[in-house]
Image (tube, rainbow, N blue to C red):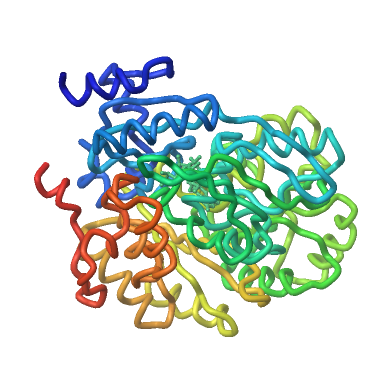
Amino acid sequence: MSVLEQLKAGLNGLQIEDNPQIVKQKSRDFFWYSPVLKKQLDEVTGDLVVTPKSEAEVIQVLKTCYELDVPVTTRGAGTGNYGQAMPLAGGVILNLAEMNRVKEIRQGSVVVEPGAIISKIDEECRAHSGQELRLHPSTYRTATIGGFIAGGSGGVGSINWGGLRDLGNVIRLRVLTMEAEPQVLELTGEDLQKVMHAYGTNGVITEVEMPLTAAYDWVDVLVGFDAFMDGVEFADALGNQDGLLLKEIAPIAAPVPHEYFLRHQKFIRKDQSVVVCMVAPFAMDAFATFVSRNRTASILYRSDTVSEEVRKGLPPAYELAWNHTTLRGLRVDPSITYLQVLYPYPDQVEKVRTMVNLLGEEVPAHLEYVRFDGKITCFGLPIVRYTSEERLNEIIRLHEDNGCPIFNPHRYTLEEGGMKQTDEVQLAFKKLADPKGLLNPGKMIAWEDPSYDYSSNKLFLFPGLQAG
Ligand code: FAD
C-alpha cells in the first residue's frame, strides 16, 4: 500500500477530501498579498484535507500521521498573510473549521473550540450577557480564534488591551502534541507563550479560554485632515485621552482613503487624509468635543447619524483598517504591496514624520495606534508602490536605519517575519511536542537550521521549496 493509502486507512471514519483542486484551495492562505511570497509559494499544496469534528478525531489524525511520518499543517480559515498556513512539505491539511462551538460563557471569560469564527463568538457573548472579546483582527467576520492565537498578533481593541501575547489576553489553551500517543496539555500563565504565535509548529490548539469585556454598538467615525501629520498628531493625542473609550484609531494618508475606500469615497476628498475611529456610543459627545478643539480636524462620516440604509451599504470601520486597508488597495491596484512597521515610543510621531518625508508618495502611510508596554504608540502598515524586490529591501533598510523595526510580511518563517532571533521557549517546546518535526514544517528556522545566522540578511529557503 502507498503511504497515501495507508493514511486514508488510518483516517477511516473521518471527513477527508483528496480532490486535488479542493486540496489546493484549502492549502492556500493570503500569502499572495506579498509579491515575494507569491513567487515562492504559488505551487505549494497539501495531499489531503481532513476535517475533524472533535478532539478525539484530531488525536486519530495526529497518531496516524506520526506513525507514517506525514506532515500536518493546521488550518483555521486560511486568512494569514505571512503564508503561515501554507503546507511547505505537503501532507495533511488539518482543517478545524467544524470544531467551532462556543462551549461556555461566564462573567469575564468564554471557552470555545479553535475553529469558532471570531465574530460568531462575539454574537453569542453579546446575546448571552452583553460581553465581547477584547481584541480581534480586521478579519473578524472570517478568521477563527485558533488561527488568530497561533498566527495573528493583535488588532481592533489593541488601543486598550495591547497585543494578543500580552499577559492576560489569553487565559488558557488546550493543546495536543504530535507523538505516538499525543498528550493533551492545559497551558496557562507563562506556558501560553510556548504555542502562541508559533504558527502551529509545536502543537494543535483544541480549546481556547479568552477574557471578555463590555460590548458596545461601536460608532464608526472618519475624521478628515488636509495634512496627514495633523491627523497623526490628533490620533496620538486622542489615544492619550484618559476618559474617552475608543476601540480603533488608524490614521491613513491621502490619497489612499479616497482611492481605495470605494464605498466611503463620497465622504472623502482625494487630497484628504483620514483617521478611522471606533467610538463607544456614550462617548460620542466627548469625542465630538475633542474633534472641535482641533482646528485641523473635521468629522466626515459618523455611523450614528446616517440612515440605516446608508450605514448598511458601507463596510464597518474595522474593514478599512489593519490589513483590510491593504486588501482594499490591492483590489484597486494589484501592483501595490505593504510593510508592517513599529514606530517605537516615545518619539513615534517624529519617526513617522521622518519616514513620510523620506519616502513620500512611494510609501503612503497607514498607522494603527496601540497600547504597547503600557504606552500609546503606533504600528504602521504602509502601502508600498512596488517596483522590485531590491527596492522593497531598500525601503525596509531605510526604516530599520531610522529606528523603525520591520516585521517583514514578505517572509514565511516565524523568525524572519518577527524578531529575527530564535524563540528558545517555542523551540524547546517543539523538541518535546513534535520530536519528528512534522507540524507545519519549514516555518521555524531554529528547528530546520540551528546554526542559521539571522544577521546575514540572507533569505531562508526551506529545502522542500528549493527542490520544488
Ligand atoms: P489561519 O490562516 O488558518 O492560520 C494561521 C496560523 O495558525 C497557521 O500557521 C496555522 O497553521 C495556525 N493554526 C490555525 N489554527 C490552529 C490551531 N487550532 N492550533 C495550532 N495552530 C493553528 N492579523 C492580526 O493579527 N490582526 C489583524 O488585524 C489582521 N488583519 C488581517 C486582515 C486581512 C485582510 C488579512 C488577509 C489578514 C489579516 N491578519 C491580521 C492575519 C490573519 O487574518 C489573522 O492572523 C487571523 O487571525 C488568522 O486566522 P485564521 O483562522 O485565518 O488562521
Q: Nearer the viewer, residue 60 or 37?
A: 60
Q: Quadrant of residue 110?
A: top right
Identified at 86% across, 65% down, the residue is 289
Q: Position of residue 159 (x, y in %)?
A: 68, 63
Q: Is residue 196 visible?
A: yes
Looking at the rendering, in which quadrant would you find the C terminus?
top left
Q: Is residue 125 above or below residue 416?
A: above
Q: Is residue 422 above or below residue 414?
A: below
Q: Horizontally, is 340 left or right of 119 in the view?
A: left
Q: Horizontally, is 78 left or right of 248 in the view?
A: left
Q: Nearer the viewer, residue 211 or 367?
A: 211
Q: Is residue 309 above or below residue 5?
A: below
Q: Quadrant of residue 307?
A: top right
Q: Quadrant of residue 189?
A: bottom right
> Furthest-front residue in view?
181
Q: Position of residue 81 (x, y in %)?
A: 41, 48
Identified at 72% across, 56% down, the residue is 247
Identified at 81% across, 61% down, the residue is 245
Looking at the rendering, in which quadrant would you find the N terminus?
top left
